[in-house]
Amino acid sequence: MLVVHHIALRLIVSAGLMLHPAAPRVQRAIVRQVDSQVAAHWPVARIVWSDSPTAIPVHVLSLRVVGSKRWCGGGAGGCHWLGSDGQPIIAVGAQSQDWSGYLSHEVIETLIDPSGTRDLYGRLAEACDPVAQNWYRLDGTWVTDFVYPAWFKPGSAGPYDYLNITHSPGKLGTGGYQDSLDIKAM
């Protein structure tokens, strides 16, 4: 099994948008969140931010564009998927004061399940969706809550998420959602 120790991400800002002045602070907070909080519960690679053309692209778009059906579907603040070359792609909307929370959400989910098809006890391994509207500040930057693997396993003991919002396996936090995996369709 291939073990990935570092994943490089690169910001790609759409034409006409300025890179948010807080971007370096947001990048540092997300690295800290992944390295010290997410990695304590999920086997994820460390992340680095890079300008390399081979790094995973993180598209920063207008909310109108990111929420379009072409990118993420109506109303979405961000999304992730595999491109035709098999490389993960992340897109987030930049015209929101809370764009860092959407970026945190998509980075964590991409690290845990790049393809968006990982099965954990009949559920998609989308670790931020069940607690999607529960964010917290890390180094002055909004980042998202995330569930632990125990959240997916029926009958398991907690804790179930970083902020301790959920108190039993499969229970959604306020504003949370989770799609069931249709194993027969795969």
Image (cartoon, helix red, strand yellow):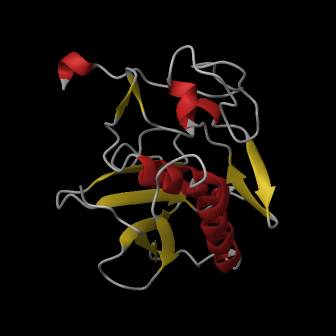
Residue 50 percent coordinates (x, y): 45, 82
Q: How many marks?
A: 0
Q: Residue at x 41, y 45 (%)?
A: 72
In this rendering, is residue 155 above or below 53? above
Asked whether 51 or 7 is in front, the reply is 7
Q: Relative to residue 12, is residue 93 drawn left or right?
A: right
Q: Quadrant location of residue 169?
A: top right
In this rendering, is residue 176 above or below 135? above
- Quadrant of the image containing the C terminus: top left
Q: Quadrant location of residue 175?
A: top right
Q: Residue at x 54, y 54 (%)?
A: 63
Q: Residue furthest top?
A: 155
- Quadrant of the image containing the N terminus: bottom left
Q: Residue furthest bottom?
A: 51
Asked whether 91 or 155 is in front, the reply is 155
Residue 78 percent coordinates (x, y): 50, 50
Q: Residue at x 26, y 61 (%)?
A: 87
Residue 96 percent coordinates (x, y): 67, 57
Residue 8 percent coordinates (x, y): 42, 74
Q: Relative to residue 79, is residue 39 drawn left or right?
A: right
Q: Quadrant location of residue 158?
A: top right
